[in-house]
Image (cartoon, coloured by chain):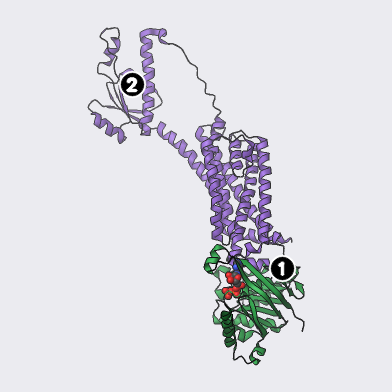
Chain colours: A purple, B green
Amino acid sequence: MNSWMIVFKKEFYRVISDRRLIFTAIILPGLAIYVMYSIMGSAITGEVDDITSHEIVVYHENMPSDYQDYLTASERDFEFHDGSELSSDTIDDMLGNTEMDIYIAFPDDFSQQLTNYDDPSYTIPQVEIVYNSGEKYSSNSYSVISGALNTYTNSILYDRFGDGIVAFQSSITDTVDESRATGQVFASILPMIIVMFLFSGAMSIGPDSIAGEKERGTVATLLVTPIKRSQIAIGKVISLTVISLFSAMSSFVGILLSLPKLMNMDDLGGNVNIYGLSDYAMILIVLLMTVFFIVGIVSLVSTYAKTIKEAGMLILPFYFISIIVGVSSMFNGEAATELWAYMIPIYNTINLLIAILTFDVSMIHLVVMIIANSIYVTALIYFMTQMFQSEKIMFQK
Amino acid sequence: MEQILEVKDVKKTFHLSRKQRKIEKTDQKKKVAVNALSFTAYPGEIYGLLGPNGAGKTTTLRMIATLIKPDEGDIFVGGTSVLKTPIEVRKNIGFLTSELKLEDHFTPNYLFDYFSRLHGVDEKDIPIRKENLFNQFGITDFQEVKVADLSTGMKQKASLAISLVHDPDFIIFDEPTNGLDVLTAKSVTDYLIQLRDEGKTVIISTHILSVVEKICDRVGIIIDGKMKVSDSYDALVDKGYEDLETLFFELLEEGDDHE
Ligand SMILES: Nc1ncnc2c1ncn2[C@@H]1O[C@H](COP(=O)(O)OP(=O)(O)OP(=O)(O)O)[C@@H](O)[C@H]1O
Ligand SMILES: [Mg+2]
């Protein structure tokens, strides 16, 4: 057996024989992504359902029956109450405590006034609406009520002036690419979450596996064995990488299972899966390259640190920077187009994930990322081996 | 007799970090931990390095164990140089410190196999060697118990067994009885005596005089990185020193006078 494999097997066994570590490093990332997106999906769908199924509570004065017909003809349910006795303070209160969704008052001789529009003494009748835009039901009631009011107005004008009143007709087409819009929703949070989970997966095992040897003093026992120090370093990095790959796969499965769920919120119906095989393959490649980089960083820092705690603390800045880079993508929502963006680790992960999720990916960017990360990882592992050779770092006081 | 260990004029200087300078209350950026130190040890003896805290005992033992390199001088273990062929030296030494804490998650059994493989012990020899050592230390009953659940004494015994997986001829033990109760300490020193009787060389460090008196055949007294005396215990007694304690304090005061 190669010496690095002895080290690898032991480190690997360390994790897979520990239920707690299996859960935090491998199961949790996928589970968290799945649960989060599922909740988000059903919350958004639920919210829309909740509002549209709500019975609109209308308090009115002198509502003309033909207007009321417009309302009752719509898909929504209404509950009509007489509001003529209500003071304006009471109306405010009732809107505030959601006893009432909307208040609408027509003048008492409204239909009379409408017919007298030719009279020189004619004053335009006033319809008063009171609602509360801070309440979701009330706010939605307003759009329903005012929509119906518009139709009502048009029909009155049509009765008065016939066709001549129609200045023009408009034909509106929304060219929104539903898939791309949905993609943008994922692209806003997913990259950050993935980077976070990959980091925390590696962070939950790397420091213990490497800095822990120094803290426990086992590094001396390890280093007096006749195997090469580079073999020890390689064995540890590979086991950390394999575990982190599991972690990445778990995130990936989480994404795979939850995206269709989240997609439902846009009512795409049966056509739930907007991403194809090649999109998923690219996501996978990006995840792998990111894992290599993160494992490289975590290993290097853990080799340098004297204790597990110190390693954890020294990794935090890298972790936070990565999260900040991820958060910035939430506001941007568009992948960078400059080539240099794909040479910067983590930033390239985020941008590529956004690009893939919004169907905007360029192969050149993917290749640049693969090359860049490979170079970084080679350098990181080289430095780590150097550190393992250095008595100053292995036995610092 | 052919010497198995030859420490020749070794010197080791450390750079002091700012934090360390504060602790040691010094402005010096460098610390000479071991200075022109020489001594020899022979097969079948226990050699004790005696010295106060910070004298350079651990540093010396680490240099012998090839963990750190001497800046000057060289060390030969069985004729092999630690500078030129450290890997050869490692094949023949067992190194143990009382600061060692085995990884909590594993069992003595697992760790024994792991370190045996790292030392390149033949796969078929591992069980035999393990049975021997585990019986010796009474580990057999708890060989499948995780280190986390072992008592300090058991842990120490397990560490001892694990550092001897490859049956080295030369055993280095930094502070062997540190932090152990009398009973466990005795079982450890008894074993060191047994190793000696098997013809192995044992070199230990300690600041406890009684340990030296009880088990060491020869003593080296290190103060401030320098070897003050290196002789057989009996010879020291013959030279008219009442006991080790008197000699030790004499040497300590001497050192203070020079400053
Ligand atoms: N890696 C290191 N970096 C810097 N200074 C060190 C290092 N190792 C030892 N020293 C310093 O060298 C001196 C000798 O240390 P050493 O550990 O060898 O002493 P010791 O005799 O083992 O003492 P103790 O009885 O406390 O174990 C001390 O002043 C110590 O602070
Ligand atoms: Mg010491």
Q: Tag 2, which chain?
A: A
* Residue at disc 2, secondary structure: helix
Subunit bearing disc 1: B
Q: Nearer the viewer, residue B27 or A223?
A: B27
Q: Is residue A208 above or below residue A155?
A: below
- Judge whether residue B99 can be spotted in this image: no
Numbered label attached to residue B119: 1
Residue B239 visible (yes or no): yes
Horizontal and vertical percent position of residue A326: 54, 42
For residue A145, side relative to residue B227 (left or right): left
Which of pointers 1 and 2 indicates the residue nearer the eye? 1
In the picture, the quarter occupied by the C terminus of chain A is: bottom right
Query: Which amino acid is tagged 1?
Result: His
Residues marked 1 and 2 touching at CB (< 8 Å) = no
User: Label 2 crowding class (10 Å Cα cut-off): few <14, some 14-19, many 20+?
Assistant: some
Place of residue B159 in the rendered image (x, y in percent of width and height, measured from the top left): 62, 72
- Say which residue label 2 marks: A68
Q: Determine whether the beta carbon of the residue marked 1 sits less than 8 angstroms from the nearest atom of ligand 2.
A: no
The tag on residue B25 is none
Residue type at numbered disc 2: Gln
How many labels were placed on the picture? 2
Task: Return the residue nearer the eye: A104 or A381.
Answer: A381
Q: CA distance from mark 1 to mark 2?
A: 91 Å
User: In the picture, which quadrant includes the N terminus of chain A?
Assistant: bottom right
On screen, A1 above or below A133?
Answer: below
